[in-house]
Image (spheres, rainbow, N blue to C red):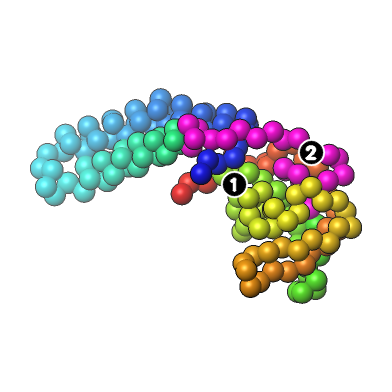
Amino acid sequence: MANEMTKKDIEKINEEIEYRKLVTRKNAIEAVKEARAQGDLSENFEYYAAKRDKNKNESRIRYLERLVKNAKIIEEDRKDDEVGLYSKVELYIEDDDETMNIKLVTSIRGDSLKGLISIDSPLGKAIKGHKVGDEVYVKVSDKYGYNAVIKNIEQTDDDGSDEIRSY
């Protein structure tokens, strides 16, 4: 399944790939050379640590390149009075008698601990396209769901994060 991303997401990923190829890779190769020069590799922890770091960087580059290659580009279009991509939303959860604040983002930027909810999540799917005052049913599984009321919507231009989550 392709990850849905905006053009901004693709740009940020390409910037990270470029940095990792030009800066991080060069530093990692240099660290491996320096550690190798210290002699006996069988007991050289610095050499193994440098090799591990170099391999992690190469894995990250391959991962990011696959993301870009398999990405499905989506538009950031939304109406001013509806929940859409990058909307900050205040929700009232009836079952818990609590209010929560979230921001709807693309799946690659989702981080529920920071209140960044993916448009592909059950909550994201339930509220997208709704307006202030709408009551929505969030279906979590076949046996469980809950009601939420949209209390407020604030439109923003992007997710406010430069971080791409890795899997």
Mark 1 crowdedness (10 Å alpha carbons): few <14, some 14-19, many ≥20:
some
Task: Identify residue type, mark 1.
Answer: Ser
The tag on residue 155 is: none
Local SS, label 1: helix
Is residue 18 found inside the magenta-colored segment of the image?
A: no
- Residue 7, visible in the rendered structure: yes
Q: Which residue is mark 2?
A: 78
Local SS, label 2: loop
Residue visible at 77% across and 74% down in the picture? 95
Spot the residue most to the front: 142
Q: Is residue 115 above or below residue 5?
A: below
Q: CA distance from mark 1 to mark 2?
A: 17 Å
- Residue 154, visible in the rendered structure: no
Residue visible at 35% across and 36% down in the picture? 58
Task: Identify residue type, mark 2.
Answer: Arg
Residue visible at 28% across and 31% down in the picture? 29
Indicate which disc, 1 or 2, sits on the residue closer to the N terminus: 2
Q: Quadrant of residue 109?
A: top right
Q: Are marks 1 and 2 in contact (CB under 8 Å)?
A: no
Residue visible at 87% across and 44% down in the picture? 81
Q: Which residue is mark 1?
A: 107
- What secondary structure do most residues of the magenta stretch adopt? loop
Q: Position of residue 103 (x, y in %)?
A: 72, 50
Residues rendered magenta in the picture: 67-89
Q: Position of residue 68 (x, y in %)?
A: 50, 32
From the viewer's perspective, tell me whether residue 143 is left or right of residue 131. left
Nearest the viewer among 143 and 71 is: 143
From the viewer's perspective, tell me whether residue 124 is left or right of residue 67. right
Is residue 75 found inside the magenta-colored segment of the image?
A: yes
Mark 2 crowdedness (10 Å alpha carbons): few <14, some 14-19, many ≥20:
some
Q: Is residue 147 above or below residue 155?
A: below
Q: Quadrant of residue 127?
A: bottom right
